[in-house]
Image: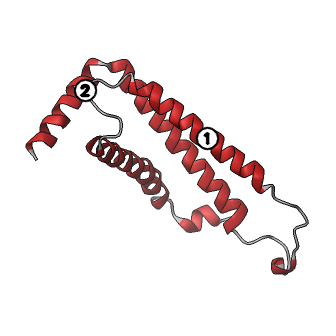
Amino acid sequence: MLSLISALRHAARRLGQARGFMVAAVLTLALGIGATATVFGVVHAVLLRPLPYPAPDRLVSLSHTLVLAGLVRVAVGLLGALALTRSLAALLFEVDPMDPGVLFLAAVFLLIVAAAASWLPARRAAAIDPSLALRSD
């Protein structure tokens, strides 16, 4: 437990010294959270909400999906992630990029940032009176 606390202190000192890296990391997190929220909004609007047609279960799609193109995109994304991981490993000092402790702390940090990013808009939306929001003039 002491090594975890000392690692957190060391990480906080290093982030304090490298403000440019910290700003880049926070902006990357904000961009990732915003993109995730956008994707989930589109998925909800396109896939989860019922269609505005009578008897939407009787609609038929006549398009084909290209499975091979999807697999190629996944492979390109994985290769890009691998290349980016190797290039970012040069920026890490005294930290192994595949260290379980580092990965755990990064996941916890992302979880905290995502919770804060979703809690603030939810709190604002909860303050709105539904009868006023749904009223049409």
Q: Quadrant of residue 21?
A: top left
Relative depth, front residue between 9 and 104 = 104
In this rendering, the answer to whether 113 lies above or below 24 is: below
The amino acid type of the residue labelled 1 equals Gly
Say whether residue 7 is left or right of residue 131: left
The disc placed on residue 86 is none
The amino acid type of the residue labelled 2 equals Glu
Q: Determine whether the residue tagged by mark 2 lies in a helix, strand or loop.
A: loop
User: What's the CA distance linking mark 2 and mark 1?
Assistant: 28 Å
**Which residue is labeled 1 in the image?**
77
Relative depth, front residue between 118 and 126 = 118
**Which residue is labeled 2 in the image?**
94
Q: Position of residue 17 (x, y in %)?
A: 26, 18
Q: Position of residue 99 (x, y in %)?
A: 30, 41
Which residue is most to the right? 62
Confirm whether residue 137 shows in the render.
no
Say whether residue 46 is left or right of residue 110: right
Seen at 51% across and 64% down, the residue is 129
Q: How is the image coloured?
A: secondary structure
Quadrant of the image containing the C terminus: bottom right
Q: Earlier in the sequence, mark 2 or mark 1?
A: 1
In this rendering, the answer to whether 24 lies above or below 110 is: above
Relative depth, front residue between 50 and 1 = 1
Say whether residue 19 is left or right of residue 46: left
Say whether residue 66 is left or right of residue 99: right
Q: Determine whether the residue tagged by mark 1 lies in a helix, strand or loop.
A: helix
Count the marks. Answer: 2
Seen at 23% across and 30% down, the residue is 11
In this rendering, the answer to whether 43 lies above or below 117 is: below
Q: Residues within 10 Å of mark 2 (few under 14, many from 20)?
A: few
Q: Position of residue 72 (x, y in %)?
A: 71, 45
